[in-house]
Amino acid sequence: MNKADSQTNRVSRRALAAPPFLAMKILDRCRKLEAQGHHIVHLELGEPDFPTPDNVVQAGLKAINDGFTSYTPTQGLLALRETIAHCYHTEYGVEIDPDRIIVTMGSSPAMFLIFGALLNPGEEVIIPNPHYPPYPSNISFLGGVPVKTALSEMTGFQYDIDEVRAKITSLTKGIMVNSPSNPTGMLQGDEVMRGLAELIEESGIYIISDEIYHGLTYGVKARSILEFTGRTFVMSGLSKRFAMTGWRLGWLIAPEEFIEPMKNIHMNYFLSASGFVQMAGIEAINQCRQQAEEMRDIYQKRRDYLIPELRRLGFGMETEPQGAFYLLINAKRYDTDSVRLANRLLQEAHVAVTPGAEFGSQAEGYLRISYAASLPDLKEAVNRLEKWIDSEKRG
Ligand SMILES: Cc1ncc(COP(=O)(O)O)c(C=O)c1O
């Protein structure tokens, strides 16, 4: 192949710079092992293992039959935006004008719209490390610069306000908050949220708050950033709380002056979320509180089982995570290279986990365990890990 034909010359640098999820590579390896007849316990998946509540499915089917099959206004159906605004009022006591909400196909496009509307080339967003992988990818793809701030296991992966302040430059546009977090499962404390809100007010920048795991907390309630400041963009959706990942329904809430430009970006790149999915979303938010709480209680039982078991096996967890369905466990005593360790656990113990390296340098040496898996599966995983560790000890 001559130089002009090489892939790097044809595909844009921007596209080539977008990294694939390591978790997908793990999943490919799982599929190969499964095709060879091996049974794999899946603790690498970041999506609920429950089906979507039946009344939501029925509402979606009814909406198709009722003809909600055309484009909707790019901002989303008013009825859904009113439902979302009402939900923020009852859950967090904040008043949100439905006109400040844009309905998107999951929260992922909401992130694209937020960074697209906020960043000029070279402008910076402070993000946590560890972090959900698409934060830096989206920021870079849209011409911005992700500025990582190390969060430590020793402080329960909390932002240190002074460290964040020290990262703010004339190019900083925002600070990313993800509480509860993927991959740590930790919530930022009220003091941190208040400190960040004060910091951005005094610096004239914004908070971008990813609240996709709200509703999945154990013994505590997640606070919305909207309770602390109005200088904020919120992205959220129904994927996790209502087991609706494949429906692709989310939203953003933005300061008023950003709404028209964001609607224009949405119109150009995504048009609208589908109408029948939006109708199903109204049903989920209005009628599925109880089912959502039942799913949450099951996650909590799994978490309560896993934390002591993983600690017994020698994995480190300074603070117990109280949200999402993840545990980020310190595995350095077994291997400081998380990719190598995750590969070995898959090949030798047939347990699939996500290597911490996926989530930034601060998570190297850690493994992300998802407990969006049944209790019998979790028990089987613990047995397999225990046997693997015993055989390692025997050398
Ligand atoms: C932290 C975080 N934000 C956003 C998303 C995207 O979710 P969706 O696009 O399904 O709303 C995910 C999915 O795993 C996530 O973990």
Image (spheres, rainbow, N blue to C red):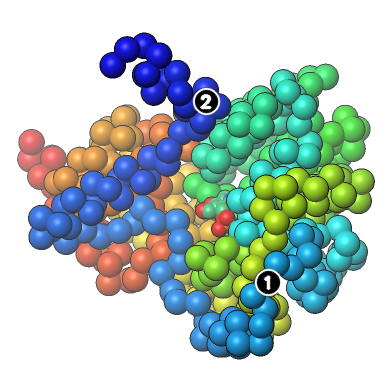
Give me the residue at 83% from left, 19% from top. 170
Q: Amino acid at mark 1?
A: Ser
Instruction: Give the labeled residue for mark 1.
Output: 70
Q: Residue 12 shows which numbered tag?
A: 2
Circle 1 crowding by C-alpha within 10 Å: few under 14, some 14–19, many from 20: few
The answer to whether residue 331 is visible is yes
* Kind of element beneath mark 1: loop
Give above or below for 99 relative to 356: below
Circle 2 crowding by C-alpha within 10 Å: few under 14, some 14–19, many from 20: few
Some atom of ligand 1 lies within 8 Å of the CB belonging to the residue at label 1: no
The answer to whether residue 386 is visible is no
Using residue 44 as the reference point, say whether residue 251 is left or right of it.
right
Q: Amino acid at mark 2?
A: Ser
Measured as percent of width and height from the top left, residue 391 is found at: 10, 45
Give me the residue at 37% from left, 61% from top. 306
User: Splitting the image into 4 quarters, where does residue 227 fall?
Assistant: bottom right
Tell me the mark number nearer the camera, choosing from 1 and 2: 1
Measured as percent of width and height from the top left, residue 172 is found at: 77, 26
- Front in this rendered view, residue 379 or 108: 108
Using residue 39 as the reference point, say whether residue 321 is left or right of it.
right
